[in-house]
Image (cartoon, rainbow, N blue to C red):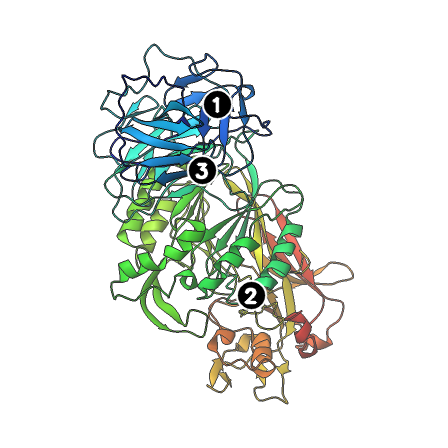
């Protein structure tokens, strides 16, 4: 990745020094440097030998490079199309030091690669000339406009250079930059050095595609923070030196100058990944080091083990990475870097959540500017909050669907948190429309839109606009967090893809469970804390499975006795069949359901009412005894879990009596006494939408009060 910021037409600098004759006729007048000049480039060399500094230098901010046994202007070095080309064997690295350019007495540059003072002689948008004084000799050096150093694949040099010093028209790789465009650059292929056409580049407000030469250009927005690209399916996701942290962006600050940002992409050896793995992780939500340590020592190792042997694994954290605790950002970022799963490194993308909005930023009562300011800290660690990338035949979008309103007090590290609503601004919708419009062959591809707050077919704050845009794809899925319980919402009668399947909203249970309650392994509705693994084949989710942290892969349900009364000797005895029970010092309602009386109650952690079914079978023969019926959403809480949290863990929040998502199925045996039944097994069957894969999960034990400490906790 190459970033340059220059005045007017000046863009992309690399130090190319050429020995010049210094005669008496040449008169130099020292001049001070005005504005920022950035000397940087990208090279592909490695393991170069150390030798003495010679006459020709290439400076990249990290080292000094010299031509072996060549003089300036030798045929071994080609300057063409804004680039310097030469075979790697022609160059060597002087040493391993980090070099930098320093201003001396406002008019001099000191280059540490060769001791001495470099006096600035002249300056133009295309060229800077220096006079070198040192070791009793005088040499002249020039700083020419060059964008990238490549060590091979030099193209044929044309008759005339692409950019002439006296040509006022700014060109990049053969493309003329239109007047008024201040965000410009080249997206090139690392293996060939050639520009890549058709790559989407954006500043988060406008989207363009690179032209036939791999060049992009557009006018920045006044709020622009980053310039970034949509990683094409045929190229690797660029990461930092710590594998697993994507770097598809560069921070910029438009100030009326031309800002050139080049990106160099590494092609995937076998082309696009038609088969790959997506992992959805809800709410790590760590507010202190002990919680981050649990995420690092429980969730991450479990994820590594569950994906072992898979070479193309991309994870998306679906918001609330921290918990109003800006001091936790470095620790959380480190926890998701260099995560090796046995075959390769897992790449972790991030979606911003409400608790990731920095409440240390001032509340100005201008909600849109407050939201903009509150995302700045997230940006410092992870880049833009609205972005996309392509893997295989899938277009993945991550967006901020938090709209902050005002601040209130918090017990967490920041001392404050943001009140908020879910939704998008008009500017975000305009960006998304542009992003999706630039996706080729949408009707043959799948789209994932990753956000924090659930949609559930909401008509508020532009949610319908997003859902409508998703209908343009063959298959569409929303990937969501926030709730601390799992839920699947299927848009059967409202939205479907071109392939015929309804839009599917996956609401992921939290990695932190019930907010890292001491030794907690349970969400607020009783399923294990964990994540979901999706196997992608072309434009389709071939298979998926919820994975409980430190639980067997086939642990997908529990069975309860609908007649049991839990914790009769405690303050809040609760049962499955009473519709209005009270618990906690605030007299919180715990809702049971009369249909569950005398029944087996099966809790299926990641179910839905369309693609799942549950049966009671004879354990000895496998013969079906009868079908379970599913409770409607909102008709019951997980009473067993609520009883445990209120009576044993002394919780006092309605979060622990949630009825929003129902995972509860019931079947009444002939005896009406589940505890007295024998030779039975409950079997839950999942049919993956749009394919032939079917899973069966079984449970042959009733979870009783005595089991809860083990069931809900480690």
| Secondary structure type for disc 2 | helix
How many C-alpha atoms fall within 10 Å of the one at disc 3: few (<14), some, or many (≥20)? many
Numbered mark located on residue 192 in the image: 1
Which of the 4 quarters of the picture holds residue 623?
A: bottom right
Q: Can residue 459 be spotted in the picture?
A: no
Q: Residues within 10 Å of mark 1 (few under 14, many from 20)?
A: some
Q: Is residue 593 above or below residue 398?
A: below
N-terminal label among 3 and 2: 3
Element type at mark 1:
loop
Label 2: which residue? 289
For the point 42% across and 12% down, the residue is: 156
Q: Along the line of sight, which residue is nearer the eye, 452 or 476?
A: 452
Quarter that holds the N terminus: top left
Residues at marks 2 and 1, CA–CA distance in whole angstroms: 45 Å
Which of the two discs, 2 and 1, labels the residue nearer the N terminus?
1
Residue for badge 3:
231
Q: For this rendering, which residue is in front, 81 or 98?
A: 98
Residue 117 percent across, percent down from the top left: 39, 33
Q: Are marks 3 and 2 in contact (CB under 8 Å)?
A: no
**Percent x, y for residue 420?**
35, 65
């Amino acid at each position: 990745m190459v970033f340059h910021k220059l005045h007017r037409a000046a863009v992309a600098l690399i130090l190319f020094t050429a020995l010049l004759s210094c005669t008496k006729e040449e008169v130099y007048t020292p001049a001070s440097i005005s504005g920022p000049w950035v000397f940087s480039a990208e090279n592909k060399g490695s393991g170069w030998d150390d030798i003495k500094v010679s006459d020709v230098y290439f400076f990249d901010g990290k080292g000094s490079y010299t031509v072996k046994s060549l003089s300036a202007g030798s045929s071994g070095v080609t300057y063409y199309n804004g680039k310097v080309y030469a075979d790697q064997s022609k160059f060597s690295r002087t040493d391993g030091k980090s070099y930098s350019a320093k201003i001396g007495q406002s008019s001099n540059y000191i280059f540490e690669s060769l001791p001495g003072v470099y006096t600035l002689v002249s300056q133009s948008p295309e060229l800077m000339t220096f006079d070198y004084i040192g070791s009793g000799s005088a040499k002249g050096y020039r700083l020419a406009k060059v964008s990238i150093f490549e060590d091979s694949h030099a193209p044929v040099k044309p008759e005339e250079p692409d950019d002439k010093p006296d040509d006022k028209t700014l060109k990049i790789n053969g493309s003329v930059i239109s007047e008024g465009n201040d965000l410009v650059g080249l997206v090139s292929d690392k293996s060939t050095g050639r520009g890549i056409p058709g790559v989407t580049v954006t500043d988060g407000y406008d989207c363009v595609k690179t032209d036939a030469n791999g060049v992009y250009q557009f006018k920045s927005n006044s709020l622009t923070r980053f310039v970034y690209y949509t990683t094409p399916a045929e190229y690797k996701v660029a990461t930092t030196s710590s594998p697993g942290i994507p770097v598809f962006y560069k921070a910029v600050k438009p100030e009326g100058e031309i800002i050139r940002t080049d990106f160099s992409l590494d092609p995937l050896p076998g082309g696009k990944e038609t088969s790959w793995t997506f992992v959805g992780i809800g709410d790590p939500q760590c507010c202190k080091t002990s919680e981050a340590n649990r995420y690092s020592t429980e969730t991450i190792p479990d994820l590594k083990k569950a994906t072992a042997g898979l070479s193309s694994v991309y994870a998306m954290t679906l918001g609330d990475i921290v918990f109003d605790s800006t001091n936790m950002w470095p620790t959380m970022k480190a926890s998701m870097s260099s995560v090796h799963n046995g075959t390769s490194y897992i790449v972790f993308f991030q979606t911003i959540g409400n608790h990731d909005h920095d409440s240390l930023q001032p509340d100005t009562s201008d909600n849109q500017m407050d939201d903009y300011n509150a995302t700045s800290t997230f940006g410092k660690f992870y880049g833009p909050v609205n972005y996309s990338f392509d893997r295989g035949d899938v277009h993945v979008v991550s967006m901020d669907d938090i709209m902050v309103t005002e601040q209130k007090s918090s017990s967490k590290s920041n001392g404050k948190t943001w009140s908020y609503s879910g939704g998008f601004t008009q500017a975000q919708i305009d960006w998304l429309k542009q992003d999706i419009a630039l996706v080729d062959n949408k009707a043959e591809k799948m789209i994932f839109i990753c956000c924090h707050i659930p949609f559930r077919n909401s008509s508020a704050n532009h949610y319908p606009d997003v859902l409508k845009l998703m209908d343009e794809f063959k298959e569409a899925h929303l990937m969501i967090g926030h709730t601390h319980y799992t839920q699947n919402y299927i848009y059967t009668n409202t939205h479907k893809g071109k392939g015929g399947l309804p839009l599917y909203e996956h609401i992921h249970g939290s990695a932190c469970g019930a907010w890292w309650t001491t030794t907690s392994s349970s969400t607020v509705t009783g399923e294990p804390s964990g994540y979901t693994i999706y196997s992608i084949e072309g434009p389709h989710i071939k298979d998926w499975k919820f994975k409980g942290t430190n639980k067997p892969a086939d642990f997908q349900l529990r069975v309860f006795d609908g007649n049991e009364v839990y914790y009769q000797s405690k303050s809040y005895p609760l049962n499955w069949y009473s519709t209005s029970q009270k618990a906690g010092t605030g007299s919180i309602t715990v809702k049971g359901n009369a249909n569950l009386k005398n029944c087996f109650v099966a809790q299926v952690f990641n179910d839905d009412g369309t693609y799942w079914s549950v049966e009671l079978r004879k354990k000895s023969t496998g013969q079906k005894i009868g079908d379970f019926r599913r409770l409607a959403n909102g008709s019951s809480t997980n009473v067993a879990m609520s009883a445990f949290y209120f009576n044993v863990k002394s919780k006092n929040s309605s979060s622990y009596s949630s009825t929003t998502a129902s995972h509860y199925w019931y079947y009444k045996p002939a005896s009406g006494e589940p505890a007295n039944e024998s030779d039975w097994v409950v079997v839950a069957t999942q049919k993956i939408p749009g394919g032939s894969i079917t899973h069966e999960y079984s449970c042959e034990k009733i979870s009783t009060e005595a089991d809860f400490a083990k069931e809900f906790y480690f």
